[in-house]
Image (tube, helix red, strand yellow):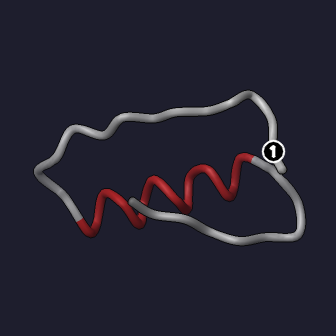
Amino acid sequence: VAFVLGHSNNNELVFKTFDIAHKEYPDVTPLFHSDRGFQ
């Protein structure tokens, strides 16, 4: 599990989150879930 906080919901936040998760768990196949929105 990884997360990034920001002032806007954009692709940069998505890629930063994936990078953090991949560095923390390099041998795991990730599962991405999106509710197609933000809160």
What is the quadrant of the N terminus in the image? bottom left
Q: Is residue 38 left or right of residue 19?
A: right
| Residue to which mark 1 is pinned | 38
Q: Nearer the viewer, residue 28 or 33?
A: 33
Q: Is residue 1 left or right of residue 37?
A: left
Crowdedness of circle 1 by 10 Å Cα count: few (<14), some, many (20+)? few
Quarter of the image for residue 6 reads bottom right
Q: Circle 1 sits in a helix, a strand or a loop, which is it? A: loop
Residue 22 picture location, percent across and down: 30, 57
Residue 38 picture location, percent across and down: 81, 44
Q: Is residue 25 left or right of residue 12?
A: left
Residue 20 picture location, percent across and down: 41, 66
Q: Nearer the viewer, residue 34 or 7?
A: 34
Q: Residue at x 36, y 60 (%)?
A: 21
Q: Residue at x 52, y 59 (%)?
A: 17
Quarter of the image for residue 12 reads bottom right
Q: Residue at x 79, y 49 (%)?
A: 10
Q: Mark 1 is on which residue type?
A: Phe
Above/below status of 31 relative to 1: above
Q: Nearer the viewer, residue 36 or 11?
A: 36
